[in-house]
Amino acid sequence: MHLLKLSDWTPEMIMDVISLGIDVKAQPQKYADRCRNQTLLMFFEKPSLRTRLSFETGMTQMGGHGIYYNIKDSALGKKENIHDFAKVACRYADVIMCRLFSHQVLEEIAENSSAPVINGLTDFSHPCQILADLMTVKEKKGRLEGVKLTYLGDSFNNVTHSLIYGCSMTGMNIAVGCPDNPKMSPDPAVIEEGQKFAQRHGTSIEVFHDAMAAARNADVIYTDSWMSYHIPPEEEQARVKAFQPYQVNNELMSCAKPDAIFMNCLPAMRGYEQTTDVIDGPQSVVFDEAENRMHAQKAVILKLLGLG
């Protein structure tokens, strides 16, 4: 079993991992030796702060060992193909985490690996982030079912796609506020797949081109970077102009419920996706959210290794 995107799992598996993550966080000593003699290979093509620190620290805290391997130091794509890389890596490592640009490359690694493969991020999907997000919402709101999450800003990205899957599979309503531009809106195929999950749970997926309308009565306001790693720097000025109406500020937060929480998966640029007074304000839970990456990923590793 792998974790490549959330829609590959069942809602029950997602909820089990969230519950396990909460228990791992509450009782770390219970799991302190659970991964003894287990090795996590962490394969990086994209830059990272939270992904590397949370996976490596989490594996260490459970008695295991993490190996950081940067693609720049690899023969992959030069003297070695993906098939052979995966066949060799799974002979050494018990579990493999990949942070890559291409989701297709991740799928090829998984197809050729006998060890579980975890998606640490691709351009299409970011399931570990959303598991941590759902865990954070569960902690702060006491439930997932019936909670409304509003995502604002650049919506043709891995976080939006994974939020659509995660919310629709756990009984949450999701509203997306973004420009009326296919390059900045969710992938229609993801919306279509998410709608099938939402129908089973009696929940909704809505796309708005008005930020205030999307934020109305939200329990959670969520945003992400306007300049993802793959966006050319020369596009920054045009993108800032397009996304400015979707900036999370105090006026926009006032459209949500009074007890709404603010989330950003980080990194965040103050003055861009959100104002400083929002991200550093009393409704912000961004650093609890960041911490929960480690706990949720511990739970994913335990689940995939059959140790949870």
Image: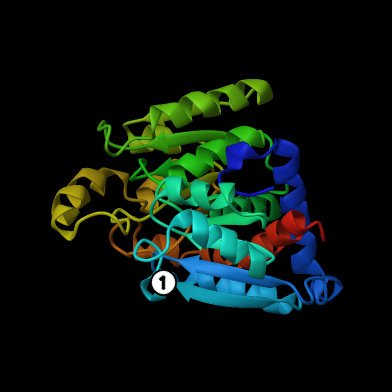
Which secondary structure lies at badge 1?
loop
The foreground one among 190 and 204 is: 190
The residue that appears at 76% across and 78% down in the rendered structure is 63
Residue type beneath disc 1: Ser
The foreground one among 289 and 190 is: 190
* 145 in relation to 64, above or below: above
Bin the neighbour count of mark 1 within 10 Å (Cα to Cα): few under 14, some 14-19, many 20 and up.
Answer: few
* Horizontal and vertical percent position of residue 35: 77, 71
The residue that appears at 60% across and 26% down in the rendered structure is 198
* 147 in relation to 302, above or below: above
* Horizontal and vertical percent position of residue 88: 58, 64
The residue that appears at 66% across and 37% down in the rendered structure is 170
Q: How is the image coloured?
A: rainbow
Can residue 77 be spotted in the picture? Answer: yes
The foreground one among 135 and 189 is: 189
> Which of the 4 image quadrants contains residue 30?
bottom right
* Horizontal and vertical percent position of residue 27: 82, 70
Residue indicated by mark 1: 74
The residue that appears at 77% across and 77% down in the rendered structure is 37
Can residue 51 be spotted in the picture? Answer: no
Q: In which quarter of the image is the C terminus?
A: bottom right
